[in-house]
Amino acid sequence: MILYSTNHQSDDVSLEEAVFRGLPPDNGLYMPHVIPTLPASFFEKIDTLSISEIAFEVSKALLGDDIPEEDIKTIVERAIDFDAPLVALEKDTYVLELFHGPSMAFKDFGARFMASLMSYFLQKSQKDIHILVATSGDTGGAVAQGFYKTPGIKVTILYPTGKVSDIQEKQLTTLGENVTALEVDGTFDDCQALVKAAFLDKELSSKINLASANSINISRLIPQSFYYFNAYAQLKKAGNTKPVVFCVPSGNFGNLSAGLIAQKMGLPVKMFVAATNVNNIVPKYLSSGNYEPKPSQETISNAMDVGNPSNFIRMRLLAGDAHEEVVKHIAGDFSDDTATRAAMKDVYERTQYVMCPHTAVAYLGLKSYTDTLSEEVAGVLLSTAHYAKFLDVVEETLGTSVAIPERLSALLSKEKVAIPMTKEFSNFKEYLLSL
Ligand SMILES: *Cc1c(COP(=O)(O)O)cnc(C)c1O
């Protein structure tokens, strides 16, 4: 895989370089020059394949020039060791549950694959790296779990004190081994500033092999395409012949971009729906043709509170670049917190199915799109997190207490281990040099 920068001011790079650099020096995003199409024979037998078999076929097509087949198999099997079941919710409406990985959010797919791929490249080159991540919640948990006990990789996670939920904090602070949590006396922006300053510091970069696990890393995007194929496979297995619509609850638009990659590789998709909360930059762009970033607003679907989506350019390029092409692939919809809560309650009362706020935004987006159609379609809404990760909002909205999965309740009784850190760079630097 050869990748270019979307700003066209940096050189093309190999997959390995793109994975360790994360961002091109010209601040664009890495994009593959070529996205191959999978053969018809793959789609004919897709309903007989497991998610990890599908992941292997897709990865082989994308990474086959960089990594031997046997190694791709090992990388995939290590990363994708959990399922993504498709649950029938109501007529022609399915929930694609992406929260069965270790941190119970879809970011596990990206984080585990990135860890598995990095570890493969590091073993080959006999190098060690130290990954720094700032998190406002979900990313840190997925990255911590993804890299946990990965040979050759140390992970330091910075999170703002008092600003992540109890469960999220426990996910960051109870692993130990190669994962260290720093509890920063500041905001998420302060945490991000510390990480940025570390990457720019000459002394640090000469002494430590620092790397980023940023969400714009290409190795996080690739594995997110697997579950679109897997959803299609499950529909086919169930005898569905209707056109398929995917509704994706979105913030930085990595997830939706991965769906477009699957479509480019030949997956039959009638339409994607980009569903957001009131941070509706992309739905506005889809209806007007104008892309106007603005400061983010807080909502109950807080993993999607993004005012300038980092993957926007990738999404646009993958969907054909020109606005009139993009709208042939992507419809938009947005919902405020009142509508989101009403959908959570309505679906729960009719079906007993509990949705997290992000999933409810997708439910509303799917309905608003399919209501405009005259034909019947199979509507798939992506459920990006388990509801128990947003327990307070869910219980308050539904007016009842809900069950917490064993994996999360076990966490709550574990002891938090975090190193307190000020937002001064000198303290952070001293800490990194002392390791
Ligand atoms: C990160 C996240 C999203 C947004 O995904 P993007 O790829 O950034 O669009 C949606 N829901 C949940 C629960 C998330 O953690």
Image (tube, grey):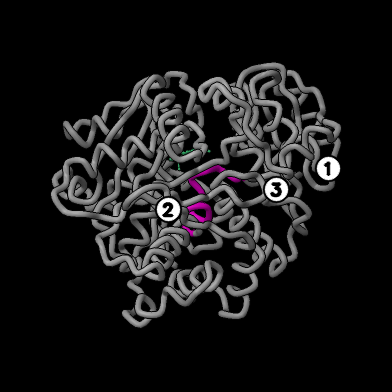
Find numbered disc 3 in the image and state the secondary structure of the residue it sits on.
Answer: helix
> Residue visible at 59% across and 39% down?
139
Q: Earlier in the sequence, mark 2 or mark 3?
A: 2
User: What residue appears at the point 38 percent right and 44 percent down from the top-left corner?
Assistant: 248
| Range drawn in magenta | 212-222
Q: Residue 88 got which mark? A: 2
Quarter holding the C terminus?
top right
Numbered tag placed on residue 95 in the rendering: none
Q: CA distance from mark 1 to mark 2?
A: 38 Å
Q: Give the alpha-carbon distance from disc 3 to disc 1, as whole Å.
A: 10 Å
Q: Is residue 233 left or right of residue 83?
A: left
User: Counting residues from the N terminus, which is met first, the one under dot 3 or under dot 1?
Assistant: 3
- The local secondary structure at tag 1 comes to loop
The answer to whether residue 262 is above or below residue 245 is below
The answer to whether residue 294 is seen in the rendering is: yes
Near mark 1 (Cα within 10 A), the count class, few <14, some 14-19 or many ≥20, is some
Task: State the image coordinates of residue 376 (x, y, percent, origin top left).
Answer: 21, 54
Chain-order first, disc 1 or disc 2: 2
Viewer-nearest residue: 10 or 126: 126
Question: Could you tell me which residue is drawn at 70 percent across and 66 percent down?
Answer: 125
Q: Is residue 200 visible?
A: no
